[in-house]
Image: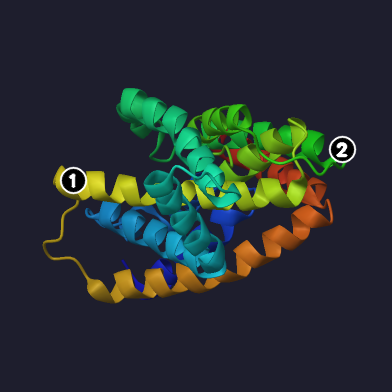
């Protein structure tokens, strides 16, 4: 892999992990455009590094929230006094249940859908566009995420494993359609993915699925830095976008890219 390819894919991952346009779908499109020869045999390691970078950027942006959540959870367990922070941490845990079940049960099936399946990516981007349009038209509320809501949002996150379905787009859209405040929906969406990313990384390492042999740490480092920096920018930008209800612009983008991908695959 060339360093420039690593940087490009890192930027794609960093931006699209938080913007509602599907990081998995765009990575597939990016790999196709760059050519399969640019993707090394140890591409799983590269993908893991990119996801670790975006998870780290989320931690940096929400560092105060995360400290409060962890402290609240610890206090709730030790004193049985459940604060808002401890209740929020429980909602995060509940949101993980559907994604873990879906991922564990259908992981091999999902993996078969990756690998230059541009037609599927295009179709799923159109689905993402529809979700964003409905979410942008939802009424403004100030309601918080409930325990029931967190489970439903978790189902959306599990379905978003499909390439082309935006994880942030799906979870934020479903949250808003459930009547949750848009800012709170964005915060919950970004925080709920952190334990899943680290859990997936740990699983891949323990199962020996990641090949460290002959890995080029030059392109890994380049991709990591690109994903981390672009992730910081995209995460902050996305929160501002959700507040201003500008999701329709991303819906239009998803429609354009989705139709282009479908035509590309047919030709």
Query: Distance between the Cα atoms at labels 2 and 1?
Result: 43 Å
- Residue 194: x %, y % from top left: 44, 52
- Residue 29: x %, y % from top left: 51, 49
Q: Is residue 35 above or below residue 3?
A: above
Instruction: Describe the element under mark 1 as helix, strand or loop.
Output: loop
Along the viewing direction, whichever of 62 and 260 lies nearer the viewer: 62
Along the viewing direction, whichever of 84 and 191 lies nearer the viewer: 84
- Residue 238: x %, y % from top left: 69, 59
Can you tell which mark lies on residue 112?
A: none
Query: Which of pointers 2 and 1 lies earlier in the amino acid sequence?
Result: 2
Asked whether the residues under the numbered discs 2 and 1 touch, taking CB atoms below 8 Å apart as contact, a structural biologist would say no
Residue count near mark 2 (Cα–Cα under 10 Å), binned few <14, some 14–19, many ≥20 = few
Q: Which residue is drawn at 72% across and 45% down?
A: 256
Any part of residue 150 in sight: yes
Q: Quadrant of residue 222?
A: bottom left
Residue carrying label 2 = 137
Can you tell which mark lies on residue 209?
A: 1
**Left or right: residue 129 compared with residue 52:** right
Q: Residue at x 48, y 33 (%)?
A: 94
**Left or right: residue 214 compared with residue 104:** left
């Amino acid at each position: 892999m060339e360093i420039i390819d690593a940087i490009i894919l890192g930027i794609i991952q960093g931006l699209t992990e938080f913007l509602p346009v599907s990081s998995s779908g765009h990575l597939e499109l990016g790999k196709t455009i760059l050519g399969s020869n640019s993707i090394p045999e140890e591409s799983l390691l590269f993908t893991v590094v990119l996801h670790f970078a975006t998870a780290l950027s989320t931690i940096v942006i929400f560092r105060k929230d995360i400290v409060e959540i962890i402290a609240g959870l610890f206090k709730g367990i030790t004193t049985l006094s459940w604060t808002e922070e401890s209740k929020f941490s429980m909602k995060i845990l509940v949101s993980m249940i559907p994604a873990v079940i879906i991922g564990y049960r259908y992981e091999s099936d999902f993996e078969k859908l990756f690998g230059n399946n541009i037609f599927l990516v295009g179709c799923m981007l159109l689905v993402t566009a529809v979700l964003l349009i409905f979410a942008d038209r939802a009424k403004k509320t100030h309601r918080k995420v409930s325990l029931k809501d967190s489970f439903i949002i978790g189902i959306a996150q599990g379905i978003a494993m499909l390439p082309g379905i935006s994880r942030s787009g799906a979870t934020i859209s479903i949250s808003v359609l459930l009547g949750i405040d848009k800012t709170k929906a964005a915060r919950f969406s970004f925080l709920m993915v952190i334990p899943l990313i680290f859990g997936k990384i740990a699983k891949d390492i323990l199962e020996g699925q990641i090949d460290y042999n002959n890995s080029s740490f030059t392109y890994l480092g380049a991709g990591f830095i690109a994903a981390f920096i672009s992730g910081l920018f995209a995460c902050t930008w996305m929160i501002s976008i959700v507040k201003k209800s500008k999701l329709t612009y991303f819906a239009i983008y998803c429609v354009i890219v989705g139709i282009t991908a479908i035509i590309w695959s047919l030709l």
